[in-house]
Image (spheres, rainbow, N blue to C red):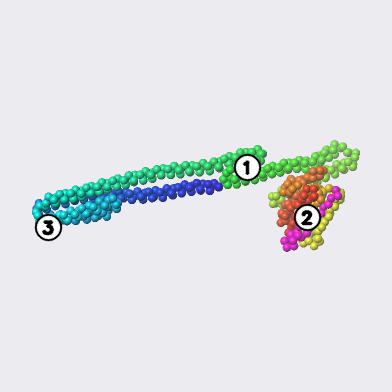
Amino acid sequence: MTIFKRLTAGYLIIMVMVLIFGGYVAYQMNHLTRIIHKAAGVDSETIQTVEALSTRLQLLVSIEKKYWLSKEKDFYDLFFKRCHEFQDQLKDLAKLTTEAHLAAPVKEILTLSQSYLEGVARADTRNEGMPSEAYKADRDDLIDALLIHLDDLYQSARQIREQRIKESEQISTNVLQVTLGLAAACILLGLSVSFVTTRQIVSPIKLLQQKTRDIAVGNFVKIEDLKAPQEIHHLAEDFNAMSERLRELDTLKEDFVSHVSHNLRTPLTAIWEASDMLIRGTFDNDPESRAELLTIARDECKRLIESVNRILDLSRMEGGMMDYRFVSVDLDALIHDAVEKLNPIACAKQITLTIDSPPDLPLILADADQLLQLMDNLIGNALKFTDAHGRVSVTAAIPQPNDGLIQVAVSDSGCGIETANLEDIFNKFRRIEHGRDTVRGTGLGLAIAKHIVAAHGGTIWVESEKGKGSTFYFSLPHA
């Protein structure tokens, strides 16, 4: 996983935990609100109502006794008025109490109060003066039953309220515990995500630092089997590519030093020796030897200039500063010119050099001098790596008339190229060595050829098999 995905996944888990906790707290707080509402509202009101009913019941008994003593109608009316108020309050209490074990006592109290009211009414209709002892006994039993039921109702209501208070306290404790637990879990998870991610970032970076130090001292190493996020993997891949490129550049540097030491120092040494011998007058009396020394100095100067010019040309090509003069060029005539110039070398090595080029080739838009140098490089390489009695052929054709390209091939029957070297031969300072007595080249010819073809909008490639010769192809667009 990438660093972003790792962090996102970790923080997403934390957010989900927080959302779940938020839902849990919201549910518990809603439940707690309902409990507090019932405890502070319904239960407290039930208790107050039961206390008020007990007081009213005692007041009813007092009014009844006063009525029996005075027989005044006002007490009688007041008694029934208060009795109806008592029953109305009981009915309100019945609506208030939703619990089944509270509703039953309220219903029983309402029934007993109705019996008490009807008993008083029956006793009054007899006009017996003071009620009988049997009535008083029944009334006292009825009042005692009412008081007992009211007291039971009172105790039950208080018990329910206390249970709800305890439940609310337990909910508060649970919410607090869950909050602390979730906070600890979120902190632990956040630290774990940070620790794991940081560790998987820091360790590979330390490894990269170590490998960078190795590269700094010339040890071009690679990072293998790195366990890290994708970003670090990509960084390691780029690091390996950089290390490989630096190794290639270091190899190029060594090849360049070797090239300079051999291809530049050798002609300079020959020039210095020839000049020294001429200055010392070694061959003052031998004009032919003196002329030979001057010829050597001239040839080596020419060789030295050509090597320097090749390096400068390649530098200008790589820097995009090479001046090309594109004109319409007859490719068939140019191929014949190149073959004619190099034919003496082929004859000297007893190599058959042939041309297979149709005379009706279309013109191409090219720099004639650069194209001639391209042909010189390819034909010269073919001659150099072909043994005596071998064969070199130059072929030009239009492989597909509709694609607008002309294809030129330079084939030889020489030593061929190792498959492992095919990808490197167009790089600068890469020389194709026969393994026997061959003239060492500068390693720039094919690199220059590649740049020339690319500048003309074409492509260049090679097909070769070790021991069976090589064929270099390049294609150029029509004019």
Depth check: 448 or 306 in front? Answer: 448
The reply to whether dot 1 and dot 2 touch (C-beta < 8 Å) is no
Q: Position of residue 116 (x, y in %)?
A: 18, 53
Residue 409's disc is: 2
Q: Residue at point 48% right, 43% down?
A: 189
Q: Residues within 10 Å of mark 3 (few under 14, many from 20)?
A: few
Depth check: 477 or 267 in front? Answer: 477
- At label 3, the amino acid type is Thr
The residue that disc 3 covers is 125
Q: Position of residue 464 (x, y in %)?
A: 77, 50
Depth check: 181 or 405 in front? Answer: 181
Depth check: 22 or 167 in front? Answer: 167
| Quadrant placement of the C terminus | bottom right
Lower sequence index among marks 3 and 1: 3
**Residue 50 visible somewhere in the drawing:** yes
Q: How many marks?
A: 3
Q: Residue at point 50% right, 46% down?
A: 10
Q: Residue at point 83% right, 40% down?
A: 274
Q: Residue at point 79% right, 58% down?
A: 396
Magenta run includes residue 203: no
- At label 2, the amino acid type is Ala
Span colored in magenta: 388-410
- Which secondary structure lies at badge 3? helix
Magenta run includes residue 404: yes
